[in-house]
């Protein structure tokens, strides 16, 4: 099929040229470029070694906004065909950015919303706020993002609010101020009044991610520190909760340091390997008691097609991604070599359905 298209393009090109030798060489170059461009596809996922809390497992990565925008995807539903399970619904705006994500648990005919997340963006297209509703505990968590002059995240403030959910007990009153109907406000696409967040800021009723970027020898480092500033609600005198430091080399992350109680870094907790610019492997530090490894395989269009989980060098599970000819992910199948593992490793197949603008 490609050869036939190449012959047609060559003939059209020669018809519009007067100098046969120059036109022949030029047309070969043009046709080669056309085929190269046609073969270059946009990948479905953006594969990066960072956990995203809104996805059902860290091995399914954020959708690539460029792919979503180009193909005009409006929503994606991800579910299995069993009578009991979990369904994931993703909605996108016309720019390809995530608008909302819903997790629904179901048992036969009964359904129960577990989580709902809504995303808000600023004029530059960067995430401005993210609101997550936890229907289990009746907690609404609002994350507010601030950026530096280079459009890198400079600070994240996380506000926790109580909201009375249907048929739910409010079991986490200490987390934040009760706001009646906060879940309904967010479902309509808006947030609680900004004055509430300003009030919580002045009273230090929020937790804050402090970001820092610096150069350490030949590496660039990105440091995140979470400070719990609940001065009135938290008796812990040490506000530093946790810290993560990522090290980059040539723009790609090479290691993650986890700081226990924000202690000084010692050895990396995770190490990352890339091949041709694509993440190929995540490994635990050698000193880990049960070192884990995740390996990634891609197709010619840079789509992730296989993720393998290894514990102590033994493969325990794998995820296989199937795509159609247009690059759309159609199914994710988990295969486990150890049937008695926790639910994370239970065999299952998730199918994807789409709607479009």
Image: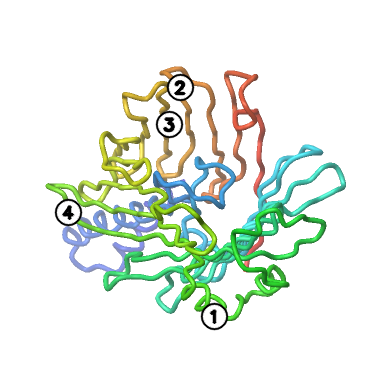
Q: Judge by depth and name the residue closer to the eye, 120 or 2.
A: 120
Q: Mark 4 points at which residue?
A: 215
Q: How far apart are marks 2 and 1 (CA)?
A: 47 Å
Q: Can residue 73 be seen in this view?
A: no
Mark 1 Cα-neighbour bin, 10 Å: few <14, some 14–19, many ≥20: few
Q: Judge by depth and name the residue closer to the eye, 18 or 161.
A: 161
Mark 3 Cα-neighbour bin, 10 Å: few <14, some 14–19, many ≥20: some
**Vertical comparison of 107 with 149: above or below:** above
- Looking at marks 3 and 2 on the same chain, the residue that comes earlier in the sequence is marked by 3
- Looking at marks 2 and 4 on the same chain, the residue that comes earlier in the sequence is marked by 4
Q: In which quarter of the image is residue 260?
A: top left
Q: Distance between the residues labelled 3 and 1?
A: 42 Å
- Looking at marks 2 and 1 on the same chain, the residue that comes earlier in the sequence is marked by 1
Q: Distance between the residues labelled 4 and 3?
A: 28 Å
Q: How far apart are marks 2 and 4 (CA)?
A: 33 Å
Which SS class for mark 4?
A: strand
Quarter of the figure with the C terminus: bottom right
**Residue 204 marker:** none
Q: Judge by depth and name the residue closer to the eye, 173 or 92.
A: 173
Q: Name the residue under label 1.
A: 194
Q: Mark 2 points at which residue?
A: 311
């Amino acid at each position: 099929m490609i050869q036939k298209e190449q012959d047609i393009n060559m003939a059209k090109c020669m018809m519009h040229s007067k100098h046969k030798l120059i036109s022949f060489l030029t047309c070969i170059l043009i046709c080669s470029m056309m085929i190269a461009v046609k073969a270059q596809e946009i990948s479905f996922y953006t594969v990066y070694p960072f956990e995203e809390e809104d996805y059902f497992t860290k091995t399914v990565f954020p959708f690539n906004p460029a792919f979503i925008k180009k193909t005009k995807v409006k929503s994606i539903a991800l579910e299995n065909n069993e009578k009991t399970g979990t369904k994931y619904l993703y909605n996108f705006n016309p720019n390809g950015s995530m608008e909302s994500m819903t997790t629904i648990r179901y048992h036969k005919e009964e359904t129960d919303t577990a989580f709902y997340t809504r995303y808000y963006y600023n004029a530059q297209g960067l995430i401005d706020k993210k609101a997550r509703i936890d229907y289990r505990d009746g907690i609404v968590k609002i994350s507010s993002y601030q950026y530096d002059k280079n459009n890198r995240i400079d600070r994240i403030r996380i506000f926790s609010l109580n909201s009375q959910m249907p048929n739910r007990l409010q079991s986490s009153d200490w987390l934040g101020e009760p706001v009646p109907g906060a879940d309904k406000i967010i479902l309509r696409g808006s947030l609680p009044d900004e004055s509430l967040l300003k009030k919580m800021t002045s009273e230090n009723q929020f937790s804050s991610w402090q970001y820092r970027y610096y150069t350490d020898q030949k590496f660039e480092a990105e440091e995140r520190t979470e400070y719990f500033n609940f001065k009135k609600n938290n008796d812990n005198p040490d506000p530093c909760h946790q810290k993560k430091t990522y090290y980059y080399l040539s723009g790609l992350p090479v290691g993650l340091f986890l700081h226990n109680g924000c202690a000084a870094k010692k050895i990396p907790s995770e190490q990352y390997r890339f091949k041709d610019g694509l993440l190929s492997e995540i490994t635990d530090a050698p000193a880990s008691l049960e070192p884990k490894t995740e390996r990634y395989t891609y197709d010619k269009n840079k789509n992730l097609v296989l993720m393998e989980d290894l514990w102590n060098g033994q493969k325990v599970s794998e995820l296989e991604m199937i795509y159609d000819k247009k690059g759309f992910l159609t199914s994710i199948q988990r295969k486990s070599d150890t049937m008695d593992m926790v639910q994370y490793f239970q065999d299952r197949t998730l199918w994807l359905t789409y709607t479009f603008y």
